[in-house]
Amino acid sequence: MVNGKQNKIKRILSVRGMGQVITVTIGLIILCIVFSIVNPIFFSGKNIANLLRQIAPILIIGIGQSYVLITGNIDLSIGSVVGMSCMISATMMTKGVNPWAAVFITFICCLTVGLLNGELVSKCKLPPFIATLGTMTIARGIAQIVNNNYNTGSIGEKAKGFRNFFYYGKTAGLYNAIWITIVMWIVFNFLLSKTRTGRHIYAIGSNVDAARLSGVNVHSTTIKAYMVSAICACTVGLMTCATTGMGTMDAGNSYEMYAVAASVIGGVSTLGGQGLLLGTVVGASIWGVLQNGLQFAGAPVAIRNITIGIIVVVSVLLDVVVRTGKHRKRKVS
C-alpha cells in the first residue's frame, strides 16, 4: 500500500513542468501568509470572494495564452479581443438586440479573430509577434468604431439575466464568474492533457518539424490553439460588460501582459512544448494575491505593476536558463 502511494507520488512529480508548479505553489502560500500578517482582513470571507472574482478573468485569459505559448507562439491580440467583445456585445444590447443573441454574435466575431491569427501564423508563416500585433490593432479599432468612438450607455434592465449569469449571480454560494472559470479550466485542461489535440499542441511546441513528420497537422492545431485563446478573451469581455453594465473601448488594456504573466509564472514555457494549466491557476492566483495584498499594504499601482513585471521577467529568464542548460546537456551526452 505504501509502495503504491509512493509510485503514485513519483508519477505525479515526473510530469513535465510539475516541479515548477510545486515551486510557485509554495511561493503563493508564502505570499498569502505574509499578506495575512500585514493585514488580517486579507483572509476575511468578503476579501476572499472579491479576490476569487479578481483572479477569474486573469485565469481565463491565462488559459488561452497558455495554449498558444505551448505551441511555441504568442497571442498579443488577447487584450484587444476582450475590448472588442465588451463593445460589440454592449452596443448590440443598447440597440435592443436580445442579450443572448448578442452573446452568440460576439463569440462568432471573436472566433474570427482567432481563426485569422491561426491562418497568419501557420499558413502565411508570419512571426506570431507581428501577426498578433496586427490583429491586436485591428481588434482595438473595431472596439472603437463599433459605437462611433464612444463608450456605450447602460445595457439596461433587459440585460439583467446576462449580468447575473456572467458576474453578479450566485450558485451554491459562489459567484457565477467563478463557476464559469472553473468549468472552462476543467474543459480546457481535459482537452490539453487527455486528448490527441492536446498531445499535438505539445508536440508542435517541442519540435514543429518533428511533429509535422510524425503526421501532426500543424496548421489545424495552431488554429485550434488560437481559437481557444479567442474563446477565453471573448468570455472575459462578456464578463467585463456584465460587471460594468456598459461597453468601454479601453476594456482589456494590458490584458495580454496579464495573460502572459499568469502563464509564465505558472511554469508555461515561452519556448513552447511545456506547461500545465494547473500552473496557470497558481500563476493567476499569484497575480491576484500580489495586486490585492499590495493594495492592502498601501502600495501604489506603479509599485504593483513593477513588482509583477519583475516576476514575469525573472520567470521567463529562469525558464530560458533551465531549458538552455538541459539542451546543452543533451548535446554533450
Image (cartoon, helix red, strand yellow):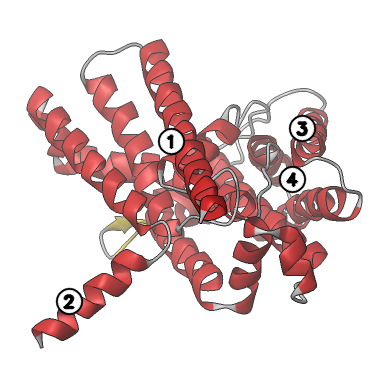
Dot 2 amino acid type: Gln
Marks 1/4: CA–CA distance = 45 Å
Marks 4/2: CA–CA distance = 56 Å
Marks 3/4: CA–CA distance = 27 Å
Which residue occupies the foreground of this view, 331 or 199? Answer: 331
Which residue occupies the foreground of this view, 32 or 199? Answer: 199
Name the residue tied to disc 1. 318
Q: Residue at x 31, y 74 (%)?
A: 11
Name the residue tied to disc 2. 6
Q: Position of residue 144 (x, y in %)?
A: 77, 28
In the displayed structure image, the side of residue 262 where residue 297 appears, left or right? left
Q: Looking at the picture, does residue 205 appear above or below residue 95?
A: below
Dot 1 amino acid type: Leu
Q: Position of residue 326 (x, y in %)?
A: 48, 49
* Residue 72 in view (yes/no): yes
Say whether disc 1 or disc 2 marks the residue closer to the N-terminus. 2
Marks 1 and 4 close (CB-CB < 8 Å): no
Query: Closer to the camera: disc 1 or disc 4?
Result: 1
Say which element carries label 1: helix
Dot 3 amino acid type: Leu
